[in-house]
Image (cartoon, rainbow, N blue to C red):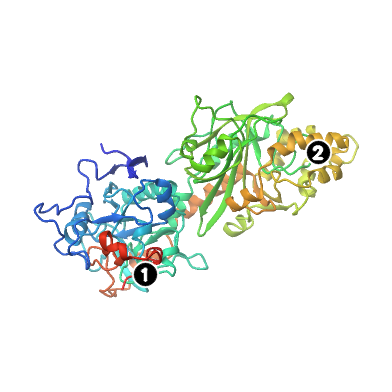
Amino acid sequence: MADSGIIICNQRYDIGHRVVTFEDPGGYSAYVPHRTDDISKIHAFDPAPGLENRISRYRRRRLVGRRNDIRRLRQVVRQVVVHLDGCMSAAMCYSVLHNERGLSIHFMVDNDGTIYQCLDLLHCAFHTSGVNEISVGIEIQNRGDAARHPGAYKEGRPTVTCRVHGHQFLCYDYTREQKEAMIRLCRALARILDVPVKSPHDAGGKPVWTTIRGLRTFEGFIGHYHAADSKWDPGPWDFPWMLTTIGSSVTFPFTAPRMRGPPAAQVAERYFENSERDVEVHFPVGPLGRSRLWHGGVHLKARADKPVRAVLNGTIVAARMALPCAVGSCNFVLTRHQLSLGRVMTVYSLFYHLALVEAQGPRVPWLDRVTGPGRVQLDRGETALLKVPVEAGEPVGLVGMGGPREAREEQVHFAIFSAVELGAVVEPGYWEVIDGGDTSRFCTDRRVLAMIDRRQGGSQPDGLLSRRELRNFFRLDTQRSRLHKLVVRHRSEWTPGDWMEQLERAPDFARLSPAGRRRMIVNQINPTLWWTREVAAHAGLPENGVIYSYHPIGFLVWFDRVARQAGTRRGAGIDSADRWEGKLPPSFLTVDRESARGMIDEEDVHSGEHGRNLTLEDLVNGYPEE
């Protein structure tokens, strides 16, 4: 059985799928310095122009140099290029590239879903002119044009239509096994190399089916036709579906992920119960027991040191690991998530009150991947600015202790927020939006207060929230389910500034003396604050701290539903075979088996000794196809 790991910088990374690498028996290697059909021959028998006398079918990435450093590789590799090869099998594709053309590819995805890796991603494959230096290439095995090659598959593979460069193609569809393999592979590449989960689209969010401007600067997943006007591959590959599927894996903080798990709504009920019964802190108000302070998340109870998992694929952008403060653990992990639902949208998840991870205790994998200044900041107990990819379900921390010393409990704060209201773009009307303003830290919204602040005996509601009112509402009142679809625009509780002024004006804290308010700020508020100008700039957050806070469990239920619905829809530009108009596209539009055009440029041809004459500007800009 082949390993399930892909090789990057000489290290194996598990992707949970069958992979046969260039090191494995039965694999295909671009490092072989001769033809495999005739080992007495070195050069390809019909080489791509410029590769006539070249022995190697790959080159070093110039911008990486001779360093075997995945951190540098992440800075250089910004694209994944998807190809349709026009071949019947991976063996055929490899022979065309290696023996005939002197070209190469990083990955091939065969009809049965087997992934073959031909090169370490540290090295540059010859597959797409203009971006070989900054990309990873994938060839999916598919005969391609079903109108020109009818009956290519004995099993009668389904066909679909698509339009590339303005011309319609009748194409063989990809197999279910290939689609699943591509999801596994591309999800791993996005996570390991931090490639943005997006593809070219127009201003209206529709996919682009032709070449794009600024090719070298685009970051994300592209097709060969985005780079070359002579190519129509990968034809009917559904980029919106792929990116939605990659970015839509939803897990819950304490639930181990499964490849095909149940809908989030089936899992969420026990998390709603956990966050609403027998806890002292709720969403969206009541963090100190008797106040209207906005609280942008929920508290979840669990045993200490239980793993806390990333709820979506993303990148950890800030974290702190230090000794306890006056309100328990002040450790946190902030993760930025790029969600693809027709367009790319950014959301953040926050876990607070995490345990300090001890060297001899349960491990949190991402911590081992932090080096450089971020490592130093974490070791000092400071807020570290990071860029560490994590996958949904991966442990990002351990449950710690939260609350003042006399009422400290095993728990974790969980929040999801964004700089803009995502629901208005994806599903207008689903979320009930409460606007708390840009400055006030207290809730004055009558809709929220009326649900919780009730008559007591014959008295009128006093406009404040008592511990009993909060507890009764979250234990007994059926209206609490309204909060599951609530999003609040407010100033984050993690931001510094004006706390004394806000507490002095609030009747909630009138019982406290000025000295008592100062002690509260020093002991309970200041140690928790992390939203500085530097963190905001690094993470892409608004400096003023004004955000949209979603009920985090409700958000996972919502996003899982809309992502599953999007995953069942065929992307714009792909149609059924009965929409075929019967006109053959121009013959100059080819796939990779048919022509080597659009696969290399002068940067590749002049690599090696000849490349010493290239300027830095040449390397940055690349070489367009002539």
Image quarter in which the N terminus is found: top left
Q: Position of residue 470 (x, y in %)?
A: 76, 36
Give the residue at x 89% y 41%: 460
Going from N to C along the chain, the mark reached first, 1 or 2, is 1
| Quarter assignment of residue 607 | bottom left
Q: Residue furthest right?
A: 458
Which quarter of the image is occupied by the C terminus?
bottom left
Q: Residue at x 59, y 46 (%)?
A: 555
Picture quadrant where residue 171 is located: bottom left
Number of the label disc, if any, that sits on residue 498 = none
The amino acid beneath tag 1 is Arg
Crowding at mark 1 (Cα within 10 Å: few <14, some 14-19, many 20+): some
Viewer-side residue, 176 vs 55: 55
User: Do we see residue 140 in this rendering?
Assistant: no
The 10 Å Cα crowd at callout 2, few under 14, some 14 to 19, many 20 or more, is many
Instruction: Where is residue 416? Give x, y as percent.
Output: 61, 45
Q: Which residue is mark 1?
A: 163
